[in-house]
């Protein structure tokens, strides 16, 4: 499978690229500055600022797109993720590609389904307040994907707190519910890749968290 990874130089995107390449996929990494990105062997790099560039030249044989987009700096557009997905969707239509898997975040699910009362009514509202420049963008991004079912076979994953430690274990997915606990970035990358080839996940949104080998 030829997989294009948006946000490939980010903390999660790097894991997606590395795992996809190890699994034998052809990988194209979309990055803002190829000069500052050292890709794994056999990975093709393509310069693209997907939030700002409405004309992304996707390879014509792209089978799927995985988005690990996120805001890195206050200078990034307020709608970084939504604009990025809009531009990616247009590029996908131009090369007749439908499959896209997108990273969102747990606090986007306002009902808090799957979490305990403290998380739903206290912690999540505080997190949304802290991330008031982040989560509305992700909500708009998800709403846009829902409107594109005629053109896109999309899946959204909503991780909880993302941890940078390289302690991959296993992950748990729940349909239309949040999953308590944090998520190691390697596990999120593995989940993004796993669902990419699973047609049963089309048009669906999943919560995700990690289960380490120690059970924590």
Image (cartoon, rainbow, N blue to C red):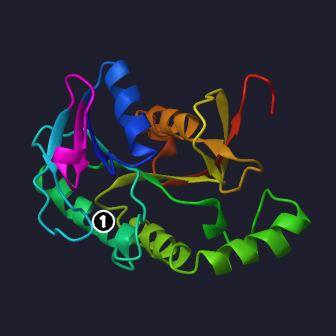
Q: Is residue 5 above or below residue 129?
A: above
Residue at position x 17%, y 40% in the image: 45
Residue 185 visible within the image:
yes
Image quarter in which the N terminus is found: top left
Q: Secondary structure at mark 1?
A: helix
Q: Is residue 42 above or below residue 76?
A: above
Q: Is residue 132 above or below residue 28?
A: below
Residue at position x 41%, y 64% in the image: 72
Whether residue 42 appears in magenta in the rendering, the answer is yes
The magenta segment: 27-43
**Which residue is the site of mark 1?**
84
Q: Which image quarter: residue 165?
A: top right
Residue 97 visible within the image:
no
Is residue 101 left or right of 213 when viewed as pictured? left
Is residue 45 left or right of 151 when viewed as pictured? left
Whether residue 7 appears in magenta in the rendering, the answer is no
Q: Nearer the viewer, residue 40 or 122?
A: 40
Q: Position of residue 53 (x, y in %)?
A: 16, 68
């Amino acid at each position: 499978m030829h997989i294009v990874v948006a946000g490939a130089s980010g903390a999660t995107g790097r894991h997606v690229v590395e795992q996809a390449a190890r699994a034998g996929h052809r990988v194209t990494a979309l990055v803002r500055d190829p000069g500052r990105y050292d890709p794994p062997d056999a990975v093709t790099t393509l310069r693209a600022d997907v939030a700002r560039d409405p004309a992304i030249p996707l390879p014509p044989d792209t089978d799927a797109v995985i988005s690990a987009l996120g805001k890195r700096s206050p200078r990034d557009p307020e709608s970084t993720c939504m604009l990025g997905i809009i531009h990616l969707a247009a590029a996908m239509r131009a090369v007749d590609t439908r499959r896209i898997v997108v990273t969102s975040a747990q606090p986007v699910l306002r009902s808090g389904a799957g979490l305990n009362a403290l998380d739903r009514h206290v912690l999540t509202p505080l997190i949304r307040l802290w991330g008031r420049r982040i989560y509305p963008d992700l909500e708009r991004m998800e709403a846009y994907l829902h409107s594109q079912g005629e053109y896109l076979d999309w899946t959204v994953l909503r991780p909880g707190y993302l941890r940078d430690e390289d302690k991959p274990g296993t992950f748990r997915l729940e349909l239309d519910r949040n999953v308590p606990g944090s998520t190691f970035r390697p596990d999120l990358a593995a989940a993004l890749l796993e669902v990419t080839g699973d047609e049963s996940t089309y048009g669906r949104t999943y919560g995700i968290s990690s289960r380490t080998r120690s059970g924590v």
